């Protein structure tokens, strides 16, 4: 055998059988073949069709035999045909014809293959390619397909369009160019860095070391700053590498990010309360980044003087002229528009061009800076040497600049207001304690250098609390406002008058020559208060106690001077209201004692140092019919503290409310224990005006009464006339609620208040208690006036169906007169001083107290 051939058998076996019938073999092959076979004669008429052909054509052999082909027969070539079956379905076939000899004559054998699925697949592939191409062309990204060597195989329409306008750029390369070679050839500046980075990334993706690559880069195009992002993706196998390089325009996104960052920087400056010129410069820098070559200016009208933040191109003279022109526009059309543009040919172009002609402006934009109220607080002016193509996005940038300037201005105003509020009293507008102390520190430093003197005055209104408690805080506030205006009208610009809080004011006087000058100032302040204040139909008279300290005699620091002035004021108030005192060391000792007493008083209730004393009330027969409960304070070291010392202090500190509540609860419980069926005793309790003014006074008192178990009809509340001043409707409503509980109401110290007697007819008062000052006059040189006043009170009370109690009775003469005048009850040292519980119980053992018996 020849080399390269294999033997099928090692020997040829001779056949003894009869040879196979060739026609049978042929028939078997054609019948069982999967290929569709047709035999045609020389005229193209079908002479034979195998079963596969019957199946392909959807017709039987009888229908196929005799069928004539209606097209030229070409041998040794493959022809694609469409066969329409009787059912209407279409079959795509490939037909190959070869020449044969049949029955001694020429004939043809046609072999047909069903290629319907292949054709369908091919069509889908074509449509898919067309769709892919259309999709790529529809994308805004600039896309190129590269092969494994970096050669451009295809590009989309966006790539082609940009390449036509890009000039010398990697984009200028089209199909057939090697993209990597073009990138490698870029050698200048930042463009070279970007191109080389892109080439390196593409090579890494082609090599398979990276699956994808991404690069954001800037691009200068037609004097415009643009940004693109390059995304590179690999597909295909290692033998047929393909790479998609897509450049997408991200200019808008990058501009938005840059604008957002610059906006954030501006807002950070605003948040840090930077001055408006610093914020404005940052905003204008933002504009210059967006529009290189733009001339800009911001005018802020609310500043004094008007602030100009502008490009260096604009001279001072231009700025002044632009300010005048812009102010005129604010009052004209600018106040009704967002942005106004001026171009050559516009009606107002001549006006603006006359100002900026020297710098060759061809386009101008004016944007008003408005506050949230709509007020134009400034203008933003933008100009360019050429007519600019500013679109909608650009006008949004201008509007953003205007909005940021507005925010900066409003924040600055808010900062000013906050600073003002931090240093000024909200009610009167005067400097507050903080600002006063700052100015006092400054005055001390200045005086240290000059060797001059300063004075600190502490001004406290007399009995202001009574006005507040009786007429209400609205009237009190209005009084303080009017008072502040009077003080302001007198104070020198170098001096400071401040409200410390409540009804307290402080004043620092600089450049003082001596104490006489300070005395004159204090006298003038008293004169300012002399005319009455007219508020809501009320005529109010106010006085003040003033204390003064001097630098450096009384202290060399702000705290010492204020403390000494405070001490001097308290000395003035305790000596005589509406007076003035300088500080001295003795007064300081008194103030320290006052402070010590205050500290002790705050702990008195929790340390069980308070006690309830009782003073009897006797009728005209000398029988004890009731008692007044009185609050007393016994300190373990200081002993019994007189009520005149601690009651006013307790009221100032707000302690009188819990003190009185404790005293009432204790007294009511004790009075219940002292009751006898044959001798009911009423208990009277004093009510503080502060206690009376509490919104929950009636409810809290009702709870105390209920807890004590005492019959409410045996309780008398002693009120002062000052409590009845004010809104008569509210007062009457409260008193009626007290009566509804079952309590009896009395007016204490009657005859010394400010109220009209008309209230006696309208209010549910049952007892009048004559002030001790009228009783004291009996038997003295003022005996006649005292008797007359008491008689008048007696007549008035009895005619109104009220009972009368006289307190402060100490002599027989006083008692006898009151008896003859018809006084219902007497209270005073003539019978007994106020006694603690144990001693008062001894007094109750007898029905009558010692003394002459009164007869009806």
Image (cartoon, rainbow, N blue to C red):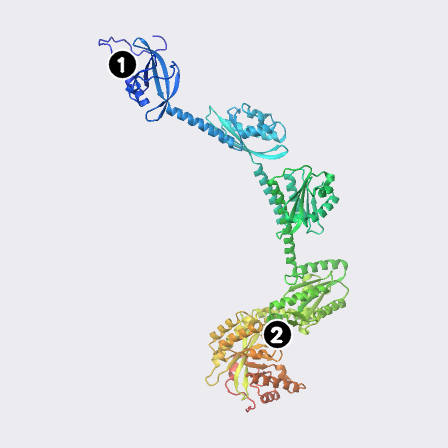
Which residue matches tag 1? 25
CA distance separating discs 1 and 2:
146 Å
Q: 818 and 70: which one is in front? A: 70
Label number found at residue 454: none
Rendered image quadrant of residue 799: bottom right
Q: 225 and 132: which one is in front? A: 132
Q: Does any portion of residue 589 appear in the rendered image?
A: no
Residue at figure coordinates x 62%, y 71% from the top left: 467
User: Going by the image, does 728 lie left or right of 378?
Assistant: left
Q: Is residue 140 above or below residue 90?
A: below
| Number of residues whose C-alpha sits closer than 10 Å to that of mark 2, classed few (under 14), some (14–19) or many (20 or more) | few
In the rendered image, residue 784, in percent from the top left (x then y), is placed at 66, 87
In the rendered image, residue 175, in percent from the top left (x then y), is placed at 54, 24
Which residue matches tag 2? 645
Rendered image quadrant of residue 485: bottom right
Residue at figure coordinates x 49%, y 26% from the top left: 242
In the rendered image, residue 543, in percent from the top left (x then y), is placed at 68, 71
Quadrant the C terminus occupies: bottom right
> Are the two marked residues, 1 and 2, in contact with CB atoms closer than 8 angstroms?
no
From the image, state whether disc 1 or disc 2 is nearer to you.
Answer: 1
Residue at figure coordinates x 39%, y 24% from the top left: 118
Q: 651 and 585: which one is in front? A: 651
């Amino acid at each position: 055998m020849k080399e390269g051939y294999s033997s099928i058998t090692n020997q040829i076996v001779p056949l003894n059988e009869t040879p196979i019938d060739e026609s049978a073999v042929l028939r078997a092959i054609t019948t069982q073949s999967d290929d569709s076979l047709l035999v045609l004669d020389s005229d193209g008429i079908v002479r034979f069709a195998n079963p596969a052909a019957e199946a392909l054509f959807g017709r039987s052999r009888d229908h196929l035999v005799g069928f004539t082909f209606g097209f030229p027969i070409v041998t040794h070539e493959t022809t694609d045909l469409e066969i329409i079956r009787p059912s209407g379905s279409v079959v795509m076939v490939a037909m190959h014809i070869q020449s044969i000899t049949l029955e001694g004559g020429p004939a043809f054998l046609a072999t047909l293959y069903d290629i319907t699925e292949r054709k369908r697949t091919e069509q889908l592939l074509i449509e898919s390619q067309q769709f892919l191409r259309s999709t790529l062309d529809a994308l805004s990204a600039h896309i190129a397909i590269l092969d494994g060597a970096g050669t451009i195989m295809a590009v989309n329409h966006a790539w082609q369009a940009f390449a036509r306008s890009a000039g010398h750029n990697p984009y200028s390369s089209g199909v057939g160019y090697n993209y990597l070679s073009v990138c490698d050839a870029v050698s200048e500046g930042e463009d070279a860095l970007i191109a080389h980075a892109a080439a390196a990334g593409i090579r890494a993706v082609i090599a398979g070391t990276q699956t994808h690559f991404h690069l954001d880069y800037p691009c200068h195009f037609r004097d415009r700053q643009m940004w693109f992002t390059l995304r590179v993706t690999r597909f295909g196998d290692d033998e047929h590498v393909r790479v998609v390089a897509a450049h997408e325009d991200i200019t808008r996104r990058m501009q938005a990010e840059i604008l957002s960052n610059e906006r954030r920087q501006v807002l950070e400056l605003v948040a840090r309360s930077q001055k408006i010129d610093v914020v404005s410069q940052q905003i204008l820098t933002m504009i210059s980044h967006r529009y290189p070559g733009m001339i800009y200016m911001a005018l802020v009208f609310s500043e004094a003087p008007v602030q100009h933040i502008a490009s260096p191109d604009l001279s001072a003279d231009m700025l002044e002229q632009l300010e005048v022109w812009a102010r005129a526009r604010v009052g004209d059309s600018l106040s009704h528009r967002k942005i106004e543009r001026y171009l050559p040919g516009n009606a107002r172009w001549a006006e603006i061009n006359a100002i900026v002609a020297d710098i060759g402006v061809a386009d101008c934009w004016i944007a008003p800076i408005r506050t949230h109220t709509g007020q134009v607080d400034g203008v933003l002016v933008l100009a360019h040497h050429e007519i600019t193509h500013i679109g909608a996005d650009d006008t949004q940038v201008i509007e953003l600049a205007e909005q940021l300037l507005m925010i900066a201005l409003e924040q600055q105003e808010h900062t000013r207001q906050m600073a003002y509020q931090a240093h000024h009293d909200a009610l009167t507008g005067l400097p507050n304690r903080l600002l006063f102390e700052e100015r006092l520190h400054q005055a001390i430093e200045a005086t240290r250098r000059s060797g001059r003197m300063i004075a600190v005055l502490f001004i406290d209104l007399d009995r202001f609390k009574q006005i507040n408690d009786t007429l209400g805080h609205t009237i009190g506030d209005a009084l303080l406002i009017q008072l502040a205006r009077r003080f302001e009208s007198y104070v020198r610009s170098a001096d400071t008058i401040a409200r410390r809080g409540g009804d307290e004011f402080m004043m620092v006087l600089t450049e003082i020559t001596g104490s006489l000058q300070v005395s004159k100032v204090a006298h003038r302040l008293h004169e300012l208060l002399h005319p009455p204040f007219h508020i809501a139909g009320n005529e109010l008279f106010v006085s003040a106690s003033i204390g003064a300290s001097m630098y450096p005699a009384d202290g060399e620091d702000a705290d010492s001077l204020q403390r000494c002035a405070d001490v001097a004021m308290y000395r003035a108030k305790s000596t005589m209201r509406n007076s003035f005192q300088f500080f001295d060391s003795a007064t300081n000792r008194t103030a320290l004692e006052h402070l010590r007493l205050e500290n002790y008083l705050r702990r008195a209730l929790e340390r069980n140092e308070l006690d309830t004393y009782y003073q009897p009330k006797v009728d005209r027969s000398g029988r004890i019919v009731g008692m007044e409960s009185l609050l007393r304070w016994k300190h373990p070291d200081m002993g019994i503290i007189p009520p005149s010392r601690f009651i006013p202090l307790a009221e100032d500190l707000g302690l009188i409310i819990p003190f009185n509540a404790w005293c009432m609860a204790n007294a009511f419980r004790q009075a219940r224990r002292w009751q006898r069926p044959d001798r009911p005793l009423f208990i009277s309790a004093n009510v503080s005006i502060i206690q009376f003014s509490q919104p929950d006074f009636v409810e809290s008192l009702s709870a105390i009464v209920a807890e004590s178990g005492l019959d409410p009809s045996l309780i008398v509340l002693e009120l002062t006339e000052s409590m009845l001043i004010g809104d008569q409707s509210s007062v009457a409503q409260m008193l009626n609620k007290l009566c509804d509980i079952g309590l009896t109401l009395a007016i204490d110290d009657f005859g010394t208040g400010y109220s009209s007697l008309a209230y006696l007819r309208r209010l549910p008062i049952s007892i009048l208690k004559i002030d001790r000052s009228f009783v004291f006059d009996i038997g003295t040189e003022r005996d006649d006036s005292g008797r007359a006043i008491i008689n008048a009170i007696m007549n008035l009370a009895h005619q109104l169906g009220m009972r009368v109690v006289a307190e402060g009775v100490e002599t027989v003469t006083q008692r006898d007169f009151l008896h003859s005048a018809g006084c219902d009850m007497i209270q005073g040292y003539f019978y007994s001083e106020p006694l603690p519980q144990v001693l008062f119980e001894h007094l109750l053992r007898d029905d009558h107290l010692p003394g002459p018996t009164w007869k009806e």
